[in-house]
Amino acid sequence: MKGTMIIDGKKVEFDGEKNVLEVVRKAGIELPTFCFHSELSVYGACRMCIVEDKYGKILTSCSTIPKDGMEIYTQTPRLLRYRRNILELLLANHDRDCTTCEKTGACTLQDLAVKFGIKNIRFGSLSEKEPVDDSSLAIVRNPNKCILCGDCVRMCEEIQGVGALSFAYRGSEMKVATAFDKPIAETHCIDCGQCRAICPTGAIAIKNETDKFWNLVFDKNKRVVAQIAPAVRVALGEEFGLEPGDITIGKIVAALKKMGVDEVYDTAFGADMTVVEEGREFIERLSEGKNLPLFTSCCPGWVKFAENRFPDMLDNISTCKSPQQMFGSVIREYYKEKDREEGKETVVVSIMPCTAKKAEAAREEFKVDGVRDVELVITTQELAMLIKEAGIVFDELEEESFDMPFGLASGAGVIFGSTGGVAEAVVTSLLEDKPDNMDKEVLFKDVRGLENIKEASFNIGGKEIKVAVVHGLKNAEKLINSIKSGEKEYHLVEVMACPGGCIAGGGQPIPMTKEIREKRAKGLYRLDKSSYVKSSEENPAIKYLFENMLKDNHELLHVHKVEKQTN
Amino acid sequence: MRINSIEEFKRIRDVYRKSLDKQYKKIIVCGGTGCVAGGSIDIYEEFKRIIKEKGILAEVDLEKEAEGVGVKKSGCHGFCEKGPLVRIEPGGYLYIKVKPEDCQEIVEETILNDRPVERLMYRFNGELYRTQESIPFYEKQTRIVLEHCGHLDAESIQEYIANDGYAALVKALEEMTPEQVCKEVLDSNLRGRGGGGYPAGKKWSQVLSYQSDVKYVVCNGDEGDPGAFMDRSIMEGDPHSVIEGMIIAAYATKATEGYIYVRAEYPLAVQRLSKAIEEAREIGLLGENILGTGLSFDIHINKGAGAFVCGEGSALMASIQGERGMPKVKVKRTVEEGLWDKPTVMNNVETFANVRHIISKGADWFKSFGTEGSPGTKAFALSGNVNNTGLIEVPMGSNLREIIFDIGGGIKGGKKFKAVQIGGPSGGCLTEEHLDMPLDFDSLKDVGAMIGSGGMVVMDEDTCMVSVARFFMNFTQNESCGKCIPCREGTKRMLQILDKIIEGKGEMKDLDLLEELADTITNTALCGLGKSAANPVVSSIRYFRDEYIAHIVDKKCPTKTCTKLRVIEIDPELCKGCSKCSRTCPVGAISGKVKEVFKIDQSKCIKCGACMEACPFTAIKEV
C-alpha cells in the first residue's frame, strides 16, 4: 500500500511497509520493542511499540497496517508513562544481577531500562527461583531472565519447524517450557541455537566452555590444534567494531597463537575433504541409482532433525562426516606418531559459528577409544570473550597465516559457510570445465541468495543433475514432503538448519538481520573470488593427503551407521 | 425420518401441532441446571412413573397422534430462587419448591381433577399467585429469547417445530435472498449480546461481502463470567433456537461450517446441544442440501477446557484450531480472516437466539422493544442479595429499580441496597444514584460500567466493596492468559496491593498506584480481558472511595467483612473470668486470672473468632 501518514505532525510517505512501526522508523524514530521480529509472526505481547492516534486510542505499531491519512503520535505524556510502567513491571520480576549476566551490554531489557532512566521499581520480586536448564550441550536456559516475549517459541516453531519450546501454564504462572518440563536435552531440540540468537535477554545463552579452552591451552602435555570455520572469519569482527563481512582471519590466527594454541588450521580444508569424498559418494549413488537424492550431512542440526522427524530418510544422508569431524579425525591421525615421540596428546579445538557442533563433537560415533576427535568446540561468541579476557587488543594484532600442511583451502571450501555453498562446491568439483569467477556468478545464481528453497540443474558429464538448496528447517520439511509426495525430484539436496546457512549460526554475534546475513555471505564469496585454488580436488594439499594418509584409510572420513542418538 | 423439501416440512409441522394439541395436560418440569441440582430429574421421573401407573400415556411421540399427558423437561423457568419448578398447562399454574413426594398429589389434584395445589404456589405479602404470568417476577418481564424456556420440552425437535421452530429458517430460504436476510438483521439493529454490542447485521454483511470457498459461523458459548448463566439456560433450554439462528446466519453469509464453543463446565448444555444437532441432522435441517434448497451447513461442538480467556474471540478461535488459547493481535478483522484465516461470523448465544424472531416478525417488530440505540430485550442473570434470584429477560432500557425491586423483589432480609456489579469481572458497579438509569449499551459506558454479558450481582449494605474488587481482580488474575505484560504483571501487582489493603497494611500512595496501574493496563492490554480487568477496582474506588480510605487509614472494614481487620474485644462488664476463651484461643492471645476480667492481646490475635463462639456469656464481640 502507498500513501502518506502524519507522524508527530510531520508528513511521512510510505510504500509497501508492513506496519506502522516500519514507517515510524522512516521518520527517524526507533520505537522500543521486545517481541517484534520482521521474520517471525506478529505477536504483539510486549506493548512497548505503542503509539497514540488523534482520538487518544492506543495502538501497537507492530500490528497496525499503515493507512493513507493516518495520524499518529509517538511521544505523548500517556505513552511515556505507559512504556515506563510496562518496563517497571518487567524489571520487577527480572533477575537484575546484570554484572554477572553474560548478556550485559547486549541485553534489550537493560538497554531500554537505561534509555528510559528507570531508577525506581515500586514492586517487590515475587516469583520463586526457577531452576536453570543446563542439560543441553549447546545452550543454557535461565527462566529467571525470561521476559516471555515468545521470540524463541516462534523461532523454533515457525522457522525451524521443531517446536521444542512453547508456553506452559497461564497468567503470571506462564513460562517458556519444554513438553512436560523435560530437560531440553531430552526433547527434539536440535541444538541449533537460533533461540539464543533471537532472545533479547540472557534467558537463553550459549553453553560457555571458555574455561575448558584455557585448561587445554595451559596443559603442557597437550598439543592444541585449532581449526577455524569459514563463517567465523566474516563475523567475529562485529564484536570488535568492524562491519559484518569484514575478513579478520589473519587476526584470528594471530590471536589464537597469542593465547597459546599450537597449530591453527582452516576448516575449509576439511570442507575440501568433504567435497572430494562426498563427490565420490554422489557419483557412486548416481551410477547405482540408489538412495537418491543425496542429502548433505555437514549440518548437525539437520542430521538430528532428520533422526527425529524423518528417520526413513536417514539412508539418503551422506555417510561422510562433516568438515569439522573429518578434519578432527585426520588431524589426530596425522599427529599420532609425533605425539608418541614427544609424549604429548593432540587435542582439536574447533572454532565454529554453530552451537550444534558442540553436540556433534560429543556424539559416540566421533570418538575413538572413548576419546573425542574434536575435543572442544568454541563458538564465535566465546572466541570473542576469550580474546577480551586475554586483554588482546584486536585491531593491533598483526595478521598471521595458517599453519601447514592443512592451512591451504580452496575457495569452494570457504563458501561452505553460506547457504548454497556446499552445493556449489560439490558441483564445481564435478564439472569438467571449471568456471571462472564471472562464470560462477551466472552459473550458480540459482543456489546463492536467501530464498527459502532454491532449485537449479547442472550438466555434469552429459547428465542433467537436479539440485535443491534449503535453509531453515521448516523449509526443509516442506521440501522433503514435496519429494515424498512425488511432486519434486532431485539428485542432490543441501540442507542447512540456520536461515542463511552457517554465517547465521546460533553461535555467531547477534543480532542477525537479513542485511547482516547478506553482508557476511558476501564476505565469503569475496574470499572465494580471491582464492588461488577454486575447486576442492585441485587443492594440492588435498591431493597429497588423499594420495598418502587417506589412500587406504577412507573410513576415517565416514560415519558408521549409528542408531538415533538419545542423550 | 428425513424431511426433503419445504413443503414436506410444513406438512410434518401440522402433524406435530395436532399431536401436541392431543396432549390434554402438560407437566413441564424445569430441567435447567439449577433445578436439576435441586432434584428436578427425580421429580420428572416420578411424574412419569405415576402417570404410567394410572394407565395414561406419558411419552408422546408427536409423529404419532395419540392422546396423553405430556411430561417434559424444559429449559430454565427463570424463578431459580424458588426451584424446583413445575408448570402445568393448560392453566399456567406454577408450583414452587416441589419435592418428589408432592408429585402424587399434583397428579391426583391438578392432572386428574383440575384442582390447584395451593400450598405449592407462590405467596408474597399475603397474596397467592396461581398462574405464572401473574407473579410479579414474571409480570414485568418480556420473555422473547426465553419464551420456550419453561414451556417446551428442551429435548424435542418435534415440539420446537410444532411451536414455529425453524419457521424463520423456512421463511428465509423461501422468500429472502442472503442479502435480504443481512439487511433485515442490520435494520433491526440487533447488537451483540455477549457484551461487545457490535451490530450483528453489519458483521454478517461484511462476511457476505468476502469471497471464499470456506466460511465459518461460530457461536460463543463460553460464558465465563462468574454470576452469568443466561447463555447456559438458552443452550440447555432452547438449543434449537441457537441452531436455527446459526443456519440462518450461514444462509445469509454463504458460510459452510459452524462451531459452537461451549465451556466444559456446562455438561448439560453440551448434552442438549449435541442431541439437538443430531436430531436436526437426522431430520435434514443440518447437513447437505437442507430442505432441498441447496444450502449445506453442519455444526460441530467444541468444548472449552477451563479458560475464561477463551471467551475472547481470537482466543476462542485459537482454541478451536487446537492452539494455546491466547488472544491474537488482529491485523485483519475476524470477518475477513477469522477461524483458520477464513471469513467468520462470531456471535454470542443470545444474539443467535434473537435471529429467528427478527426474521419471522421483522426488524420493525424487534425495534418496538428496547431503546433506539439498543433495541430488543436482554437476558440477565440476577443473583446476590435479592429475594428473587434467577434468570430474567427485560427490554433494553429497563432501569435497575424495576429489575431489582419489582422483579427481584427487593433486597433480602429487608436490608439496604448498596450496589450492583454488572458485567462480571469486566464490569463496574452501579450504585443508588444509578437506580433510575436505563440499562443499554450506550448509557452505561458514561458511568464506567458495561452491560457485559448480563450477569448482575446485587449487593446489600453489609458487602465490603474493597473485598468485591479484590474478588474480581483475583479472578481476572487467575484467568489472564499471560501473553501481554500489562495484564500478566499489572493485574498481579494490583491484586497484591488490594491484598495489602485488606490486611490492613495499605498506604494512601497504594491508592494512587492502583489508579496508575489501572490506567496503564486498561489502555495497553492486548485483549478485552486485560482492557477491562481494572473496571471493578476503578469503579469501586470512584463510588466507594471512603471505604478504601477506611481500610487504609483507619485500618478498619466498615462492613466488618475483612477478617484481618476485625477487632475482637472482651466486654469487661460481661466477662466472668471463666477462662474458656483463653483455652480455646489457638494462638494464646488471651490472658487473665480466673474470676478476673480476661484480655485479648491484639497483636497476637488472628481474628479467627473462636473465642466469640466459645464464650458462654457472649461477652466477646467484634467492635
Image (cartoon, coloured by chain):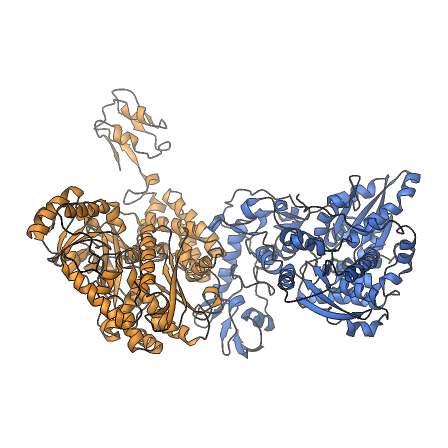
Chain colours: A blue, B orange
Counting from the top left corner in percent of width and height, residue B188 is at 28, 73
Q: Say left or right for B199 vs B405.
A: right
Front position in the image: B146 or B460:
B146
Q: Against B174, is A101 above or below?
A: above
What is the x, y in percent for residue B90? 11, 58
- B21 over B208 or under it: above or below: above
- Residue B312 found in image quarter: bottom left
Q: Is residue B6 above or below residue B80?
A: below
Q: Which residue lies furthest to the top in this view?
A: B594
**Relative to the observer, which residue lies in front, A280 or A539?**
A280
Along the viewing direction, whichever of A32 and B198 lies nearer the viewer: B198
For residue A419, what is the image quadrant? bottom right
Name the side, left or right, on which B47 lies relative to A245.
left
- Depth check: A340 or A549 in front? A549
Residue at point 22% right, 26% down? Answer: B616
Residue at 10% across / 45% down in the picture? B105
Image coordinates for residue B422, horizontal then vertical, percent = 30, 57
Q: Quadrant of the N terminus of chain B?
A: bottom left
Q: In this view, does B128 lie to the left or right of B430?
A: left
The number of numbered discs placed on residues in the rendered structure image is: 0
The C terminus of chain B - image quarter: top left
Q: Residue B209: x percent and y percent?
A: 42, 76
Q: Is residue B125 visible?
A: no
Residue visible at 67% across and 66% down in the picture? A514
Q: Is residue B368 visible?
A: yes
